[in-house]
DNA sequence: CCCCTGACTTAGAACCATTAGT
DNA sequence: ACTAATGGTTCTAAGTCAGGGG
């Protein structure tokens, strides 16, 4: 496919979407903001001495196919320091052009090179090792997560904390788990539960591993997610506490029952949000509220309602809270966490795992994104009788918290990973789930599988591209549409685009693009403008293959506004086609592939032998590029403008300082040369006295310090401006193979927690990737 | 084949603890 | 020590995709 990507060999280019690319979704600006370089408070993750480690567990498991192997030892990087053998990873065949995402290579969006400056960093590369930091972060993590001291008493028996369920259920899996621990040599009881995590739950593909499951396990059908599952159910929000503050109707205070007051309060406290002025929101809220007020209630018109007394009450409450002393706050917090402690953990096949969202969603007004037709609707309170519990049949069923009530259902479905579920009150056919946290083995395993699949796409991408290029000119209209859609998904990392219901926000993805979303700009450019997931605007102009351009023009011809560009296509058909090209391939894999290969390529190309600071900046630039490809946006932080002003002021101030120093330096230099000529001459005024103390050398030093600060501040400012609408986190958490990052950190000796490349939580989520070989390439 | 539902991933905003600045 | 900014964590909405049933 010579011409298709021929002009794209230049590698990723940093670019910026035009400022016209603003969000259309509900604004409600956040306060979060861009990545600002901060001194590192955490320690180094990988010291030189343990950069390269043996994956001892690989040897134990002795299955190199990687794919189905029980994943590496978790949370114990610290224990592997001494093992120095390198496990040679399979080298991908590097640089063939096919492996680079197209989007990153060529881009016709109004582009602007990033202004992040790799230089300008302080020469402080290796500061920051105070003694506390000596301990690798991962080691500290290991301690904290391996031995959650308190609670976890799913069995209500503290003494069994670390091994109770393995003991109770080892007939099923406990034996294997225990073995795996013992084989690795004696370890304190404290770490047992974490080490048990070394074992993935049994699954069909596991049979080749050294520690195979008992063969008499009946369900080795690959769909089984767990053998034993123990947990304590869910936490319900506290019942509503009436405040008795009366809102006004027609200027007069109104009596409301607690139930009515609750909903009024939900509305009142949203005064400061964009929702409060949205017509749809108000209408939906008022309709639902009136149902609770009843037909005969005096409140019949929204315009006559005055919620401010309630709003003000709420405001005062918030103030009160924030004025509490830190001790009081801490005490309150502790009390709370004590109450939920036992819900935070589950035991999956005897291994203690964190539960994710164990809290049932509290009642409230629905906050749909974009122009969601249901925004403002009352999301009613969920009761125990709404909840289905999924738990091992051996495990005690959590007690229903309301006396006289019972769970909707208790089931023991081993093929699913959720612990509890209920129907979403806004959309009764939707189901909400309680899952394990991202740090759990179950999530980690499927995460790894996701990235392995994306890596596999690398081997197929060449033929896939050849395939669709051929079909650009197919006479079969469906084939042609599939080809063009695949091209867009590959090149632009678009989402698949499932059909949506009438009662959802009107957003699109690739397969659901409407004719008005694409404009053909001769000779061969396409301009996309549509609202994607979360009603985030995708606005991008790209140069495409002429065949693609012509095809799109043809698809759009004669269709009315609202017509589908791809009328012979939907995600099911598209994915069915993709499955023929590569086993397991679906549209979303391209996004993962595109993101990860971009990071890998960028890092390998752009990383220089600079300071750690400079390297961390390279990482951020790579991250930013991926975020832009994936169109991960955020609202401009509320305080952005004022922050920019402050930085400008600072720069002005520093510039003035610099000018002043220049003047003084000049004077000092003159003075020196005068003195050299006329040694006796001494200045007598105070100014000269002061200046005498500052030698030209000192002034020069001061001057360069100020200059450095100016450059730093300017970089900082530009960076902030650059990132004001870019969300870096989403790609880090969902699209970038963590092994790329870990390997890069090891190779370039960048502590992984430096500048928060990975935060504590992300490290926990990616525990499975921590022992990757430094030579790993995506 | 649809069409529908269930399960799971991906997403930005809200929340809130920590840190930086004064 | 206080306050404001910052950014990590939690929350839950909104996607993707598989698979069951007609």
Image (tube, coloured by chain):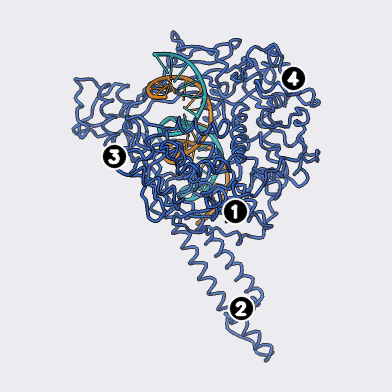
Chain colours: A blue, B orange, C cyan
Helix, strand or loop at mark 1: helix
Task: For mark 3, name the chain.
Answer: A
Q: Is residue A660 visible?
A: yes
**Callout 4 environment at 10 Å: few (<14), some (14 to 19), or many (20+)?**
many
Labels 3, 1: one chain: yes
Instruction: State yes or no: discs 3 and 1 in contact (Cβ < 8 Å).
Output: no
Residue A691 disc label: 2
- Percent coordinates x, y for residue A575 in the rendering: 49, 32
Distance in Å between CA atoms under marks 4 and 1:
44 Å
Q: First in sequence, mark 2 or 3: give its number.
A: 3
Specify few, some or many for label 2: CA neighbours under 10 Å numbering under 14, 14-19, or 20 or more. Answer: some
How far apart marks 4 and 3 lie (CA) works out to 59 Å
Give the residue pinned by disc 3. Answer: A277
Q: Nearer the viewer, mark 2 or mark 4?
A: 4
Q: Secondary structure at mark 4?
A: helix
Whether residue A11 is situated above or below residue A585 in the rendered picture? below
| Percent of width and height locating residue A436 | 56, 25
Residue hosting label 4: A178
Callout 3: SS: helix
Mark 2 lies on a secondary structure that is helix
> Which residue in the protein does label 1 denote?
A617
Is A608 placed left or right of A575 in the picture? right
> First in sequence: mark 2 or mark 1?
1
Which one is nearer the viewer's eye here, A13 or A384? A13
Q: Judge if badges 2 and 3 mark residues of a common chain.
A: yes
Q: Are marks 4 and 3 in contact (CB under 8 Å)?
A: no
Q: Does residue A642 sit above or below A767 in this rendering?
A: below
Q: Residue furthest top?
A: A404
Q: Earlier in the sequence, mark 2 or mark 4?
A: 4
């Amino acid at each position: 496919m010579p011409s298709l990507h021929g002009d794209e060999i230049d590698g990723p280019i940093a670019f910026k979407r035009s400022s016209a690319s603003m969000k259309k979704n509900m604004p409600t600006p956040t306060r979060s903001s861009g990545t600002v370089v901060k001194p590192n408070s955490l320690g180094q993750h990988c010291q030189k001495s343990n950069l390269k480690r043996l994956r001892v567990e690989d040897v134990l498991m002795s299955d190199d196919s990687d794919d189905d192997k029980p994943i590496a030892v978790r949370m114990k990087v610290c224990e592997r320091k001494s093992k120095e053998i390198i496990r040679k990873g399979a080298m991908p065949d590097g640089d063939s052009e096919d492996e680079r995402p197209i989007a990153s290579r060529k881009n016709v969006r109004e582009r602007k090179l990033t202004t992040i400056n790799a230089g300008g960093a302080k020469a402080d590369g290796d500061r920051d090792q105070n003694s506390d930091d000596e301990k690798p972060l991962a080691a500290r993590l290991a301690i904290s997560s391996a031995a959650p001291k308190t609670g976890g008493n799913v069995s209500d028996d503290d003494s069994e904390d670390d091994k109770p369920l393995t003991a109770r259920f080892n007939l099923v899996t406990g034996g294997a788990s225990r073995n795996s621990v013992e084989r690795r040599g004696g370890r304190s009881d404290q770490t047992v539960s974490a080490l048990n995590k070394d074992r993935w739950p049994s699954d069909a593909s596991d049979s080749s591993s050294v520690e195979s499951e008992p063969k008499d396990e009946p369900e080795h059908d690959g769909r089984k997610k767990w053998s034993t599952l123990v947990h304590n159910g869910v936490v319900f929000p506290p019942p509503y506490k009436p405040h008795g503050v009366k809102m006004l109707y027609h200027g007069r205070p109104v009596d409301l029952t607690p139930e009515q007051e609750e909903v009024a309060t939900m509305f009142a406290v949203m005064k400061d949000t964009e929702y409060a002025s949205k017509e749809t929101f108000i209408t939906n809220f008022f309709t639902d509220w009136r149902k609770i007020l009843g037909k005969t209630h005096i409140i019949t018109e929204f315009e006559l309602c005055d919620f401010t007394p309630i709003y003000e009450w709420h405001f005062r409450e918030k103030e009160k809270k924030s004025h509490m002393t830190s001790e009081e706050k801490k005490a309150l917090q502790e009390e709370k966490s004590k109450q939920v402690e036992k819900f935070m953990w589950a035991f999956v096949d005897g291994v203690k795992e964190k539960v994710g969202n164990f809290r049932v969603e509290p009642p409230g007004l629905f906050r749909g994104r974009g122009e969601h037709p249901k925004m403002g609707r009352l999301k009613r309170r969920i009761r125990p009788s709404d909840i289905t519990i999924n738990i091992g049949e051996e495990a005690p069923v959590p007690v229903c918290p309301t006396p006289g009530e019972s769970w909707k259902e208790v089931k023991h479905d081993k093929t699913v990973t959720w612990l509890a579920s209920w129907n979403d009150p806004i959309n009764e056919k939707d189901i909400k789930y309680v899952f394990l946290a991202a740090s759990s083995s179950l999530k980690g395993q499927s995460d790894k599988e996701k990235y392995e699949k994306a890596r596999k796409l690398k081997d197929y991408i060449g033929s896939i591209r050849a395939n669709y290029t051929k079909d650009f000119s197919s006479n079969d209209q469906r084939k042609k549409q599939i080809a063009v859609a695949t091209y867009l998904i590959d090149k632009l990392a678009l989402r698949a685009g499932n059909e949506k219901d009438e009662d959802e926000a009107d957003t699109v993805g690739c397969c659901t693009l409407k004719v008005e979303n694409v404009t053909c700009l001769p000779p061969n450019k396409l301009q996309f403008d549509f609202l994607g997931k979360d009603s985030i605007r995708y606005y991008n102009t790209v140069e495409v293959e002429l065949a693609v351009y012509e095809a799109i023009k043809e698809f759009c011809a004669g269709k009315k506004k609202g017509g589908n560009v791809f009328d012979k296509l939907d995600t099911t058909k598209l994915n069915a086609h993709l499955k023929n090209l590569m086993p397991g391939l679906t549209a979303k894999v391209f996004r993962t592939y595109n993101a990860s290969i971009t990071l890998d390529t960028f890092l390998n190309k752009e990383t220089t032998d600079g300071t750690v600071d400079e390297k961390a900046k390279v990482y951020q630039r790579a991250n930013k590029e991926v975020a832009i490809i994936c169109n991960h946006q955020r609202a401009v932080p509320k305080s952005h403008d004022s922050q920019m002003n402050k930085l400008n002021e600072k720069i002005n101030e520093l510039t003035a300082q610099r000018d002043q120093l220049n003047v003084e330096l000049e004077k000092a230099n003159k003075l020196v040369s005068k003195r050299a000529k006329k040694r006796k001459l001494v200045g007598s005024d105070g100014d000269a006295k002061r200046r005498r103390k500052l030698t030209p050398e000192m002034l020069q030093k001061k001057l360069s310090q100020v200059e450095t600060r100016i450059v730093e501040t300017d970089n900082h400012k530009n960076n902030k401006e650059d990132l004001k609408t870019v969300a870096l986190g989403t790609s880090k958490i969902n699209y970038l193979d963590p092994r790329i990052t870990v390997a890069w950190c090891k190779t370039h000796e960048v502590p992984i927690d430096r500048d928060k490349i990975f935060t504590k939580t992300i490290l926990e989520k990616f525990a499975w990737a921590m022992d990757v070989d430094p030579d790993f390439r995506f």
